[in-house]
Amino acid sequence: MLKKILIILFFVCILPKVSFCEEEKWQQQNSAHFIIYYKEAPEDFINEVIESAEDYYQKITRDLGFTRYEYWMWEDRAKIYIYKDSEDYHSASGKPSWASGHAEYEKKIIYTYPLAWGFFDTLLPHELGHIIFREFVGFKNNNVPLWLDEGVACYQERTRRWGSEKEVRKSIEEKKFIPLLELTEIKSLSDFDDAKVELFYNESVSAVSFLINNYGKYNFVRFCKELKDNNSLDKAIDSAYARFDNLKELNDVWYKYLTTNE
């Protein structure tokens, strides 16, 4: 009997310590749509993360026209984990040394560390773009091509959005342009060299910009909703846009715009 009591007392004493250690490891701040977990990050950095994440959340949903669909509140808030520093992040994540962060889209989690290169201007808007878009169309929707997924994410990066069209026009002059039909067949970028990867991203964001800026958010939302409803890419294009009926016709209109600005 005494032995059982001692065993129970042992676990009663040790369990709070484990829990306390976990609480000490990650401090926490909450905002309307995000939970920020951090270790030793400066307070002003955490405040900037919260402010930027909330601003991007509003901007991305507004830019894509998804404002009235999904809301991240209470237990459904997205999470951002901020490790102590670069060494701590790379040791825990196993990511390559050049990585400044990464995301788990279905879990709505972003990982990074203080002073990570490009976090506020590139990584944060890009990864939030992926999460918001994929949450809308479906995380495992095979009808969504890689170029559309990456194009929407890159559309949130201000410099990428503004500079892509010039680079795509340059690729046409150099006869390196990849038509949308071929772009849609690309499922992975792992075998591409740096130049082709860069072209893929530039064409992707250029195509998304073309659809949103020339034909409006309403049609883009309708296009995405058709994909969400498990319709094919051609069917989604046909349902959402009057100017073109399928991917080939979209490519022709987009190519004409790039070469003549019409």
Image (cartoon, helix red, strand yellow):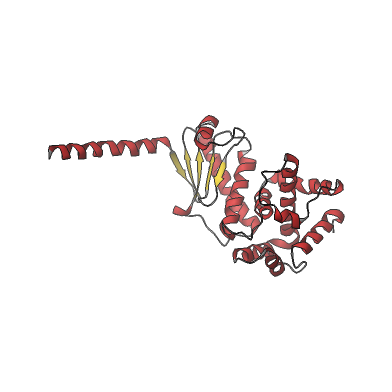
Query: Is residue 208 visible to the viewer in this orientation of the structure?
Result: no
- Relative vertical location of residue 180 with respect to residue 196 in this rendering, above or below: below
Q: Nearer the viewer, residue 31 or 2?
A: 2
Q: Residue at x 43, y 38 (%)?
A: 27
Q: Picture coordinates of residue 9 (x, y %)?
A: 20, 38
Q: Residue at x 46, y 34 (%)?
A: 39
Q: Picture coordinates of residue 187 (x, y %)?
A: 66, 52
- Relative vertical location of residue 48 with respect to residue 139 in this rendering, above or below: above
Relative to 215, 118 lies left or right: left
Quarter of the image holding residue 252? Answer: bottom right
In the image, farthest residue toward the top: 87
Query: Is residue 46 visible to the viewer in this orientation of the structure?
Result: yes
Relative to 9, 237 lies left or right: right
User: Which quadrant is home to the C terminus?
Assistant: bottom right
User: Which quadrant is home to the N terminus?
Assistant: top left
Relative to 31, 4 lies left or right: left
Q: Residue at x 64, y 62 (%)?
A: 224
Quarter of the image holding residue 120? Answer: top right
Q: Picture coordinates of residue 8 (x, y %)?
A: 21, 40
Relative to 183, 64 lies left or right: left
Q: Nearer the viewer, residue 169 or 75?
A: 169
Q: Residue at x 53, y 41 (%)?
A: 111
In the image, farthest residue toward the left: 1
Q: How many marks?
A: 0
